[in-house]
Each structure stands twice: as C-alpha cells, then as structure tokens.
Amino acid sequence: MKAFIIKRYGKKEKLQPTEVAEPVVKETDVLVQIHAAGVNLLDSKIRNGEFKLILPYKFPITLGHDVAGVVVKG
C-alpha cells in the first residue's frame, strides 16, 4: 500500500512517498481504505519534534490524522 512517511524529526523534513506492507489487523482494530487525507497542524508539530518527549514515535512514521475512507477489514 502507499504511504507518505518521514524518517526523522525536523522542520525541513519532507514527506516521502513509499510502499509499505499492509498492517496486520488485530481483533480490536479496523483497516480503513483511505480516500482522502489531510496533514494538519498536529502533524506538523509531530514532524518538528514538538511532542517527542511525550509521544516517542518509532521511525519511519506516517503522518495524516485527518482521513476519510471505508472500513475494509475489522
């Protein structure tokens, strides 16, 4: 599946298009086929590293907390 990722924190870090494996859907999860996504202020703050002390992400990470789509598994 396609995703836009960042590989590290930084104000100049660019979103990079890449292919990623389909995530494993657990009993309490759903898989959503995204039709539209937006990058908002929260995403830019995460990219800049403003929350790294309280939200220690493991890179690479996919940004885009505003999404619309259809549940395909779950």
Image (cartoon, rainbow, N blue to C red):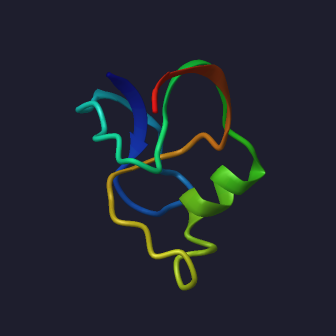
> Which residue: 30% across, 28% down?
18
Q: Seen from this angle, which residue lies furthest left? A: 21
Q: In the rendered image, is residue 68 in sight?
A: yes
Image spot of residue 9 (x, y percent): 46, 63
* Looking at the image, residue 29 lies above or below residue 50: above
> Which residue: 35% across, 47% down?
26
* Looking at the image, residue 11 lies above or below residue 4: below
Q: Seen from this angle, which residue lies furthest bottom? A: 53
In the drawing, does residue 24 fall left or right of residue 64? left
Label total for image: 0
Image spot of residue 43 (x, y percent): 64, 51
Q: Seen from this angle, which residue lies furthest front? A: 27
Pick whichever, 5 or 24, lies toward us. 24
> Which residue: 34% across, 53% down?
7
Image spot of residue 40 (x, y percent): 74, 43
> Which residue: 54% across, 75% down?
55
Quadrant in the picture for the N terminus: top left
Q: Seen from this angle, which residue lies furthest top? A: 35
Image spot of residue 37 (x, y percent): 64, 26
> Which of the 4 quarters of the picture holds residue 45?
bottom right
* Looking at the image, residue 36 lies above or below residue 12: above
* Looking at the image, residue 62 lies above or below residue 37: below
Pick whichever, 30 or 50, lies toward us. 30
Q: In the rendered image, is residue 36 in sight?
A: no
Pick whichever, 69 or 57, lies toward us. 69
